[in-house]
């Protein structure tokens, strides 16, 4: 009996390593992602948007009555399918902010990725699940990394479904498909890498507002539209330099803003 007590007193429980904690958190979050209907709904929406935009491209827009003539508000006319991927728009969108086609290009999925993380974080806090996460599973930085990974993965998935939807919509509407294939591939890869900085930004908004989902949604759209042009650096003329620059921006942005998110989590109560 004495020997047994001695052995028990010497037994120590090692704290899980960072890798083990992060692996556990990632498994939990990705399990929830693949079992969350909203993820598949967003993938579907990302695929449907190109059909809506190309279908409405060139449609007359109502404008102001100047004298005896109606001056239509400028709209973006897509003549090539890949304009949606390049996210062109500029002056026409600025001249007519209500032009749906001016904003509903592939850059819209960056905001969708932010909304996906917003829903996850808000549910964690509103259900009280966040207490269990930080008590049993992980530390604050693990939470930030895992949620960012979910956002980037979800955003990349939406880029892929948007691409598929664009191809199908282009075939149905008879738009041209002329493109520099290398530039198109570099453009898509660059946008996926840029998800890092956007998802980090949106996660920071989500952890700040916590269970107040409506506020998170409002500010996600606000910041998304504010930084909308940043995602347009990846065009159909993208090169390896564009990819490298996007990768570095994604990594640096994710690390820097992720650190801010972890700091917010540490300084605020769980509820």
Image (spheres, rainbow, N blue to C red):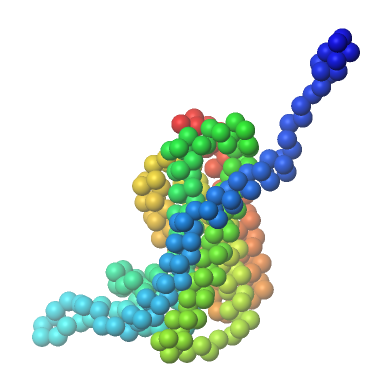
Q: Is residue 209 left or right of residue 97?
A: right
Q: Quadrant of the N terminus?
A: top right
**Residue 198 placed where, x, y %?**
52, 57
Q: Is residue 188 visible to us here?
A: yes
Q: Residue furthest front?
A: 1
Image quarter of residue 63: bottom left
Residue at the (53%, 89%) spot, across then down = 178
**Residue 147 placed where, x, y %?**
56, 48
User: Does residue 234 lie above or below 170 as drawn?
Assistant: above
Q: Residue furthest right?
A: 3
Q: Is residue 106 left or right of residue 143?
A: left
Q: Is residue 233 visible to us here?
A: no
User: Does residue 86 lie above or below 249 as drawn?
Assistant: below
Residue at the (56%, 64%) spot, across then down = 156
In depth, the one of 79 and 119 nearer the eye is: 119
Q: Is residue 80 left or right of residue 34?
A: left
**Residue 35 placed where, x, y %?**
53, 53
In depth, the one of 249 and 7 nearer the eye is: 7
Q: Residue furthest top?
A: 2
Residue at the (59%, 52%) spot, across then down = 30
């Amino acid at each position: 009996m004495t020997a047994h007590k001695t052995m028990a007193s010497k037994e120590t429980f090692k704290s899980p390593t960072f890798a083990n904690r992060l692996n556990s958190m990632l498994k939990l979050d990705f399990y929830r992602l693949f079992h969350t209907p909203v993820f598949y709904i967003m993938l579907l929406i990302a695929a449907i948007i190109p059909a809506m935009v190309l279908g409405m491209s060139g449609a007359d827009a109502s404008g102001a009555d100047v004298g005896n003539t109606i001056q239509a508000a400028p709209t973006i006319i897509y003549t090539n399918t890949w304009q949606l991927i390049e996210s062109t728009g500029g002056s026409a969108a600025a001249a007519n902010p209500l032009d749906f086609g001016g904003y509903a290009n592939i850059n819209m999925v960056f905001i969708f990725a932010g909304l996906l993380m917003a829903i996850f974080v808000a549910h964690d806090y509103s259900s009280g699940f966040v207490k269990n996460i930080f008590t049993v599973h992980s530390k604050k930085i693990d939470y930030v990394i895992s949620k960012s990974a979910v956002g980037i993965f979800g955003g990349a998935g939406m880029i892929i479904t948007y691409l598929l939807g664009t191809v199908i919509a282009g075939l149905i509407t008879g738009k041209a498909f002329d493109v520099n294939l290398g530039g198109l591939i570099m453009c898509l890869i660059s946008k996926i890498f840029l998800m890092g900085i956007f998802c980090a930004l949106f996660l920071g908004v989500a952890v700040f507002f916590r269970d107040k989902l409506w506020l998170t949604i409002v500010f996600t759209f606000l910041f998304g539209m504010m930084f909308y042009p940043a995602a347009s650096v990846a065009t159909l003329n993208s090169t390896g330099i564009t990819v490298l620059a996007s990768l570095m921006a994604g990594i640096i942005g994710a690390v820097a803003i992720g650190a801010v998110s972890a700091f917010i989590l540490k300084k605020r109560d769980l509820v």
